[in-house]
Amino acid sequence: MAKAAARHILVSTEDKCNELKAEIEGGADFADVAKQHSTCPSGKNGGALGEFGPGRMVKEFDAVVFSGDLNVVHGPVKTQFGYHLLEITSRTE
């Protein structure tokens, strides 16, 4: 079964999500940005979600994590929780 590991940053607006994505693309550390801005409890761990299989996260999240490129910042991804930036750190098929 496929498994992936990812980290994310959760914020309430698409504008804030885009602002943080620009910071990371400009050289800011993903984990530091997550610690400062993410509203998810995982933020204190740099946004790390650990390893999980398909169906463990909401479908919008899964769609990116199990098809997107590794080690690239994806998003904004809108879910029922808000707007996410996602970085897939590993994936096995």
Image (spheres, rainbow, N blue to C red):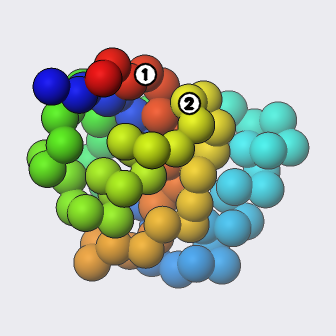
84 left or right, relative to 28: left
Quarter assignment of residue 61? bottom left
| Image point (25%, 63%), residue name | 59
Crowding at dot 1, Cα within 10 Å, few <14 / some 14-19 / many 20+, comes out as some
Q: Are marks 1 and 2 in contact (CB under 8 Å)?
A: yes
Question: Residue 37 at x, y = what percent?
Answer: 52, 55
Residue labelled with disc 2? 70
Circle 1 SS class: strand
Quarter assignment of residue 20? bottom right
Residue labelled with disc 1? 90
Q: Is residue 47 visible?
A: no
Residue 31 higher or lower than 16, as above or below? above
User: What's the amino acid at mark 1?
Assistant: Ser
User: What's the amino acid at mark 2?
Assistant: Leu
Which residue is nearer to you in this view: 91 or 11?
Answer: 91
| Image point (20%, 52%), residue name | 57
Question: Residue 23 at x, y = what percent?
Answer: 77, 50
Name the image quarter holding the N terminus: top left
Circle 2 SS class: loop
Crowding at dot 2, Cα within 10 Å, few <14 / some 14-19 / many 20+, comes out as some
Which residue is nearer to you in this view: 93 or 90?
Answer: 93
| Image point (30%, 23%), residue name | 93
27 left or right, relative to 85: right
4 left or right, relative to 73: left
Q: Is residue 11 visible?
A: yes
